């Protein structure tokens, strides 16, 4: 049996995504009722982060500890990766110490190389191309709100970045409609879009069209980690993609708003919307914990 990893959403089938979401919901409810499984007893999970993180790091570390395991965190500064130790060597060494690797880095090829050389599961905790753990949490949040995912009308507003790519793969797997509103030159990954050609996914340069009738409206920063130097230029280009009340008025009356955070208030999203009744951003962030636990449990089970 080949090792199972989570490098991108399309590493999971639609049924597996739904199973992780259901299980995350169960763990969320179970924790309050004192039902607390500990499948990670005597297991260690290493987190290697080459970019900053609040939610992903803390939800994984807390989740690992709640499941009875131990987390070891390494920033790139602390590891030999920063001194150019080959990724493939790191993969083989870490496989001899720990039971899973959670990695936040730049290129997708880095997590792919780790996975190719590791004998333990590798989880992508964000790359420039994908953010699968976050989108699983977004899907749980939407499922809690609407009781379904298939057939929903979702929209993505802003940069065609890692989050947008993972939303596209989720739409393919779960059969929901996705309209992405992105400025010219900032479309999602061309290859990922081409692979999704048969799904109900469109890209428009008109933000109002992207949001029209949407039940779920998601957005994200205009300059992702590693693009800080481009921020001033991007703010000008993305100006009309700001999610504010005027734009949201065109969405469905039942629309909810997601943002993976951190957010720049009054840049990509108005403060009014962030703090308003349509915003599920805090629930969405809170769900990270339950989803990480369900995902770890799934990968441990799939890789006995
Ligand atoms: N949404 C998200 O991944 O947040 P962090 O960068 O704080 O982990
Ligand atoms: N697109 C953002 C997501 C942060 C969680 C980034 O990559 O910085």
Image (tube, grey):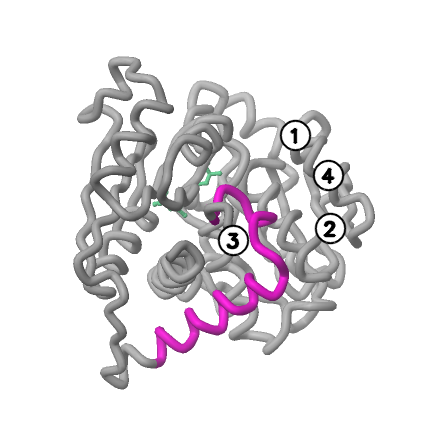
Residues at marks 2 and 4 touching, judged by CB atoms closer than 8 Å: no
Residue 242 horizontal side relative to residue 20, left or right: right
Q: Nearer the viewer, mark 2 or mark 4?
A: 4
Magenta region includes residue 19: yes
Residues at marks 2 and 3 touching, judged by CB atoms closer than 8 Å: no
Q: Report the residue that reaches farthest toward the right.
A: 198
Q: Nearer the viewer, mark 2 or mark 3?
A: 3
Disc ID at residue 186: 1
Residue named by callout 2: 179
| Location of ligand 1 given as a quarter of the image | top left
Residues at marks 1 and 2 touching, judged by CB atoms closer than 8 Å: no
- The image quadrant of residue 86 is top left
Name the N-terminal-most of marks 1 and 3.
3
Measured in 3D between alpha carbons, the distance from the residue under mark 1 to the one under mark 3, in whole angstroms, is 20 Å
Provide the major secondary structure of the magenta segment. helix
Q: Position of residue 7 (x, y in %)?
A: 49, 42
State the residue at coordinates (55%, 74%): 145
Name the N-terminal-most of marks 4 and 1.
1
């Amino acid at each position: 049996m080949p090792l199972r990893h989570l490098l991108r959403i399309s590493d999971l089938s639609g049924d597996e995504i739904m199973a992780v979401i259901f299980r995350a919901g169960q763990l969320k409810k179970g924790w309050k009722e004192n039902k607390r499984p500990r499948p990670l007893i005597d297991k260690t999970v290493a987190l290697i982060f080459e970019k900053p993180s609040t939610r992903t790091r803390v939800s994984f570390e807390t989740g690992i500890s709640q499941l009875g395991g131990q987390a070891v965190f390494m920033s790139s500064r602390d590891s030999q990766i920063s001194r150019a130790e080959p990724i493939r060597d790191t993969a083989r060494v870490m496989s001899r110490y720990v039971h899973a690797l959670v990695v936040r880095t730049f290129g997708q090829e880095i997590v792919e190389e780790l996975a190719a050389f590791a004998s333990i599961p590798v989880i992508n905790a964000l790359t420039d191309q994908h953010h699968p753990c976050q989108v699983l949490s977004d899907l749980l949040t939407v499922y809690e709100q609407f009781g379904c995912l298939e057939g929903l009308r979702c929209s993505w507003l802003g940069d065609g970045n890692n989050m947008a790519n993972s939303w596209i793969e989720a739409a393919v797997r779960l059969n929901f409609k996705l309209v992405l509103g992105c400025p010219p030159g900032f479309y999602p990954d061309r290859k990922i879009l081409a692979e999704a050609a048969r799904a109900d996914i469109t890209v428009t340069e008109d933000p109002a069209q992207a949001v029209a009738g949407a039940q779920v409206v998601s957005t994200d920063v205009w300059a992702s980690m590693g693009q800080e130097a481009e921020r001033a230029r991007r703010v000008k280009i993305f100006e009309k993609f700001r999610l504010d009340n005027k734009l949201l008025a065109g969405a469905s009356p039942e629309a909810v708003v997601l943002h993976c955070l951190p957010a720049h208030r009054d840049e990509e999203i108005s403060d009014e919307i962030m703090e308003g009744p349509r915003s599920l951003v805090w629930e969405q962030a809170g769900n990270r914990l339950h989803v990480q636990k369900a995902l770890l449990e799934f990968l441990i089970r799939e890789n006995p």
